[in-house]
Image (cartoon, rainbow, N blue to C red):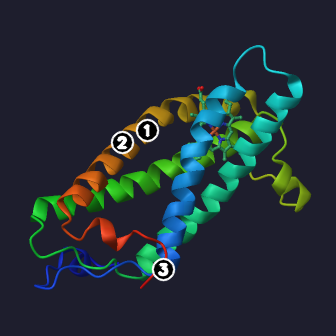
Amino acid sequence: MTMKAETATPATGGGRYPVPVRFLHWIVAVMIIATIPVANIMQQDGLARSTQDLLFILHKNGGVIIFLLVVARILWRVLTPAPPMPAQMPGWQVAAAKAAHWALYAMLLVMTVSGYVRVRAGGFPVEMLDALGVPHFVPRSDALAETAQSIHSTGRFILVALILLHVGAALQHAFRRDGVFGRIWPPLGR
Ligand code: HEM
């Protein structure tokens, strides 16, 4: 992605993201929207042990998949320019959208990496990685696990705030029908 491509304002308005990028966006969106309530429920008192274990497995392994998809999305965005925004969109909105997207990517990395570190440093399994024989990338350490846990726990507020901002801006574009929402939706079609 180049600055020039993202801030360009051709008279015809922006194109759309390629279909694989649109798929990636909506898959990651659904997974994140699911993983936050799962995280909150899995920690509640009084859950049956089997239910709690299942929710933890879903959260941890779903989080690893989110990490891989977000890395793929970041690489794609770095290597391939985003389609230009519509010509009538003010420069500050283009810059704000770009900053918000990168802040979202960054927070998704913070959340997934801190979750992984919390689990590994705490000496717990990540079932999918263990089944694939992936080595542990962090040492066992209670202090490290505690730090990662507080980053993971605090980070959720920043992530949720960014998601609300992102959804709010997207809905505003959808209602105004200015062509921005159509760049990423629907995943099928042209
Ligand atoms: C985008 C991805 C992720 C999001 C949005 C997310 C979100 C959350 C949230 C909101 C909580 C509740 C925090 C609290 O109540 O203090 C939580 C807890 C937790 N998450 Fe994640 N998480 C993600 C990825 C991961 C990953 C990849 C792992 C591990 C491989 C993981 C492991 C955990 C664990 C173990 C807890 C319980 C923390 C504790 O010990 O108190 N998470 N997560």
Residue annotated with mark 1: 160
Amino acid on which the number 1 mark rests in the picture? Val
Amino acid on which the number 2 mark rests in the picture? Leu
Q: Nearer the viewer, residue 146 or 89?
A: 89
Q: Position of residue 93 (x, y in %)?
A: 16, 59
Residue found 43% across the figure and 38% down from its top: 160
Frontmost of labels 3 and 1 is 3
Q: Which mark is residue 19?
A: 3
Asked if residue 188 lies left or right of residue 4, the reply is right
Q: Position of residue 134 (x, y in %)?
A: 83, 60
Asked if residue 34 lies left or right of residue 180, the reply is right
Q: Residues within 10 Å of mark 3 (few under 14, many from 20)?
A: some
Q: Residues within 10 Å of mark 1 (few under 14, many from 20)?
A: some
Q: Can you say which quadrant of the picture contains the C terminus?
A: bottom left
Q: Are marks 3 and 1 in contact (CB under 8 Å)?
A: no
Q: Position of residue 127 (x, y in %)?
A: 85, 49
Quadrant for ligand 1? top right
Q: Are marks 3 and 2 in contact (CB under 8 Å)?
A: no
Amino acid on which the number 3 mark rests in the picture? Val
Residue annotated with mark 2: 164
Q: Nearer the viewer, residue 158 or 23?
A: 23
Q: Is ligand 1 closer than 8 angstroms to the Cβ of mark 1?
A: yes
Marks 3/1: CA distance?
A: 26 Å
Residue found 78% across the figure and 33% down from its top: 122
Q: Quadrant of residue 91?
A: bottom left
Marks 2/1: CA distance?
A: 6 Å
Marks 3/2: CA distance?
A: 24 Å
3 or 1: tag closer to the N-terminus: 3
Q: Is residue 139 visible?
A: no
